[in-house]
Image (spheres, rainbow, N blue to C red):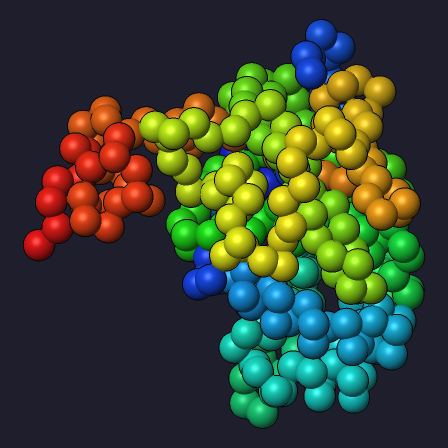
Amino acid sequence: MKTLVPRAMLWMALAAGCGPVGESAAPAEAATGQVTRAIEDDNGLTPNGLAFNGLAFNGLAFNGLAFNGLAFNGLSSPQFASWFQQHPSESNDFMKYLVRCAVPEGQTRSYTLGSTTYEWPGSLGLAPGWANGAAATLEEQQVVSACLAALTNKYGRSVLLSVQGTNARGVRIPTTSGELADFPLREACFFGNLFTGEGLFVGNDQIMLRGNQTSLRACALMGKKECEPLVHVGSCHEFCQHDATGTYFARCTRGGISYHALSTRLRPQEIYICGDGRCQFPETCARNNASPHCKQDCGTCD
């Protein structure tokens, strides 16, 4: 993970497996002297890995990390050790993204198993209390869950995203008007609670793929079943409420439960047009391509 430029966006993507209105009100600029960040993440955690580790993580919800926090006591607890040691590789991937969502930039969390030390850098700091060793509050559970959902990528390719919303205490993720202009496509809303097993949900904001379009962001834009445990709920506007500026969805309600939500924005170049003469993944050769519009871009299969 590397810091690219001092702008207020999280650029992340998770790898995939088999199988988050108008903007007449200008958002607040980052405060003078405030450190903002842009991060391009490597791919790692799959939707399957999210599902597996989510189910395993539920067993820790109030006996392990959720109770002891993401500080020394939590990571040294017998419950965490038992969970991590069952599948170290998958658990390492899950913790990498969990820490990046929950812990502030400039801090790291580490765990040693035998001769191997795993180290995970923080980034967004969405759960400040939990990151400092307190039990995870309901708001922290929800916003970290939304963050993990927002970073899920079906195809395992890096995508530049602008993540909008607040941390568990209502502090805005630093942003600028320039960032919103660079990422004009309002993609999706994400919400849920991985800790309690209530589910993870995604909805469309202002864009949805047409028949001649493809994107690496299929989990958000198309509602693929291969992206489970993410459940596509349709339009964000049916379930969610904007913040006071109309910039992002602040809360979403499903099953009578109100969730702390996050929203995502894309650059126009992340939507690919079939038939433009360029073969761009996930477009494929003719025999393997479900869309007739894309066959001419990638030619015939060998």
Quadrant the C terminus occupies: bottom left
Instruction: Work out which residue is located at the far left of the displayed protein and give it.
Output: 302
Total count of labels: 0
Residue 53: percent from left, percent from top: 64, 71
Q: Residue at x 63, y 59 (%)?
A: 229
Q: Residue at x 67, y 41 (%)?
A: 233
Tell me which corner region of the image, top left, top right, bottom left or bottom right, holds residue 72. Answer: bottom right
Q: Report if residue 211 is visible in the image.
A: yes
- Residue 283 is left or right of residue 38, and the answer is left
Instruction: Work out which residue is located at the far bottom of the displayed protein and give it.
Output: 114
- Residue 177 is left or right of residue 59, and the answer is left
Residue 120: percent from left, percent from top: 61, 65
Give above or below for 292 relative to 185: below
Residue 148: percent from left, percent from top: 65, 53
Q: Residue at x 38, y 29 (%)?
A: 211
Residue 123: percent from left, percent from top: 66, 50
Give above or below for 103 relative to 250: below
Instruction: Work out which residue is located at the far top of the displayed protein and give it.
Output: 24
Q: Residue at x 60, y 64 (%)?
A: 50
Tell me which corner region of the image, top left, top right, bottom left or bottom right, holds residue 204. Answer: top right
Q: Nearer the viewer, residue 49 or 209?
A: 209
